[in-house]
Amino acid sequence: MNGGGDECGGEGAERNAAEAEARELLELCAVEKKWSIERLEDRLAALGEGTWVADGEELEHGARVAWRNHAKCIGRLFWTSLEVRDRRDVDDPDEVHAALLEHLDAATNGGKVRPIITIFAPADAEGPRVRIWNRQLLGYAGYRQADGTVIGDPANTDFTDQVRALGWSGAGGMFDLLPLVIQRRGEAPRLYAAPVGHALEVPLRHPEFGWFGELGLKWYAVPVIADMVLRAGGVDYPAAPFNGWYMGTEVGRDLADESRYNQLPVIAARTNGGRSSWPPLWKDWALLELNAAVLHSFAAAKVRLVDHHQASVEFLEFAMREGKLGRAVSADWSWIVPPVSGSATPVFHRRWQTLDVRPDYFSQEVAWESFSG
Ligand code: ARG
């Protein structure tokens, strides 16, 4: 190890790990961005002196490589296209909020969804300086009922309880967009109106079944993950919302999972237990037709979304390109294989290793349980 005495845990070990990650990022940038030796030496010297702060290019590459490294993501072929918005100077909730609305507009792009990350103030020695409480910038409220059932999205019941406690009251419907909550360290969380004018939504219709539209289902166009931490160059960015475009089966699951909108029995009921002539397959039938409706509706609305067959082929292309460049691919089979028709996609028939790599995106503690007000 490099000199520094007999540190064997705690803060010293963390500092060493952070420095090692920073050095790794700089060396990665040097190779992949074709830096001169002088430039690398310059940046390493800054690191050695303790004055290194990622510059724009290092931050951009760090965020992109974090996507490239993320074992659960099937959509990584497009990692170089990630647009990185550097807002590390921002920890004021009002300014964060304004930037989030800009992010939504730019990412939605009238349906031609663009992958974007906006990176706010990094954590310091005391932890996160600012947190976004929402799981995603767009999401639907889940209202707990007295009988234990939920109206809306059960994935958001805890968050919905929180915003109600902060004074929000929703309309009580199935698809009420949630408000945004942003908190700066040491301050009370601030509540902002649901980003209604910034949320493109797609009403779901089926290409053949007219009754499907009567179910009143819809989904939003852009998933912007807001509760994960970007770890790059040994620095944590706890407020760094990012988005790609949807794969159809994700929306299918949001609406079909028993722990979510649980719509398979509803769809099957429309056709006397499902059209399947083989009764045990009623769920399979309903799930397939739901997924058909998602693909059809997003296409009709001209909103970018990828089907699971194409996404699987694109992932193999990504893995092949990485192999050619001599880079190991970290992938989690249970996340990569689509939840519909798994074995009919080529990724099912392959095996990968899940590696401990950085940069990457990680889950972090729920803000309202861990973050000081
Ligand atoms: N599965 C999540 C959802 O259904 C979105 C996760 C991110 N997905 C993506 N395509 N970038 O909302």
Image (tube, grey):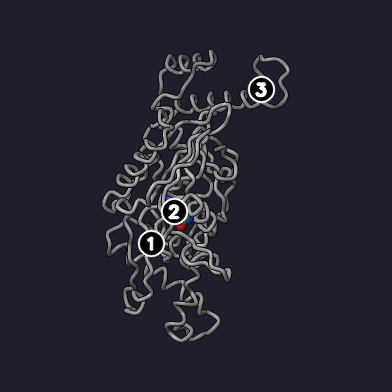
Q: Nearer the viewer, residue 142 or 24?
A: 142
Secondary structure of residue under mark 3: helix
Residue assigned mark 1: 219
Question: Relative to the observer, which residue lies in front, 27 or 123?
Answer: 123
The alpha-carbon separation of the residues under discs 2 and 3 comes to 43 Å
88 left or right, relative to 69: left
Residue 225, above or below 15: below
Q: Nearer the viewer, mark 2 or mark 3?
A: 2
The residue that mark 3 highlights is 12
Q: Which residue is mark 2?
A: 168
What kind of residue is marked 1? Answer: Trp
Q: Position of residue 161 (x, y in %)?
A: 52, 55
Task: Name the amino acid, label 2.
Answer: Trp
**Residue 68 bears which disc, if any?**
none
Q: 368 and 117: which one is in front?
A: 368
Q: Secondary structure at mark 1?
A: strand
